[in-house]
Image (cartoon, rainbow, N blue to C red):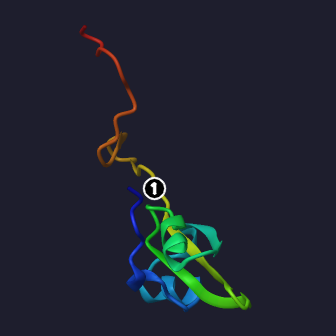
């Protein structure tokens, strides 16, 4: 079953305003346009599961019986490991090696 994106995370504000309001930067996110000429449920199901919010959300009647839903999904980029230059180690839980260790 497809996960339905929560309606409460559909925002009409811009990406710049939203990101500024949470104290992050635009380069912390990937942006992906989401568009649908179908049902509202179809639109919600098209939003990627990793999206934090959809900004610039709009609804437009394009024909008597057709509605277009549109917005931009903001997807947080994965955090990169930070090198601790004093110890030479990477911070965080990053396992770059697979297989047996040197003592195997």
As drawn, which residue projects farthest toward the top? 104
Q: Is residue 85 above or below residue 48?
A: above
As drawn, which residue projects farthest toward the left? 103
Q: Position of residue 23 (x, y in %)?
A: 43, 82
Say which residue appears at 44% left-offset and 61% top-offset: 50
Q: Is residue 3 above or below residue 70?
A: above
As drawn, which residue projects farthest toward the front? 65
State the SS at label 1: loop
Q: Position of residue 43 (x, y in %)?
A: 55, 73
85 relative position to 73: left or right: left
Q: Could you classify mark 1 by the number of other residues whose Cα lies within 10 Å: few (under 14), some (14-19), or many (20 or more)?
A: few
Q: Is residue 101 above or below residue 5?
A: above
Q: Quadrant of residue 87?
A: top left
68 relative position to 16: left or right: right
Nearer to us in this view, 8 or 21: 8
Q: Position of residue 92 (x, y in %)?
A: 30, 48
Nearer to us in this view, 26 or 13: 13
Say which residue appears at 56% left-offset and 77% top-offset: 39
Q: Position of residue 35 (x, y in %)?
A: 65, 73
Nearer to us in this view, 43 or 20: 43
Name the image quarter holding the C terminus.
top left
69 relative position to 52: left or right: right
Say which residue appears at 49% left-offset and 60% top-offset: 77
Q: Quadrant of residue 73?
A: bottom right
How many dots with numbers?
Answer: 1
Say which residue appears at 49% left-offset and 66% top-offset: 45
Nearer to us in this view, 12 or 79: 12
Name the image quarter holding the N terminus.
bottom left
- Residue underneath mark 1: 78
């Amino acid at each position: 079953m497809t996960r339905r994106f929560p309606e409460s995370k559909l925002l009409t504000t811009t990406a710049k305003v939203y990101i500024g309001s949470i104290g992050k930067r635009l380069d912390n996110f990937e942006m992906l346009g989401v568009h649908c000429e179908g049902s509202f449920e179809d639109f919600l199901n098209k939003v990627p599961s990793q999206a934090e919010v959809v900004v610039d959300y709009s609804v437009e009647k394009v024909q008597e019986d057709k509605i277009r839903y549109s917005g931009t999904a903001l997807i947080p980029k994965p955090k990169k490991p930070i090198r601790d230059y004093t110890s030479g180690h990477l911070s965080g839980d990053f396992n770059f090696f697979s297989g047996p260790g040197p003592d195997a």
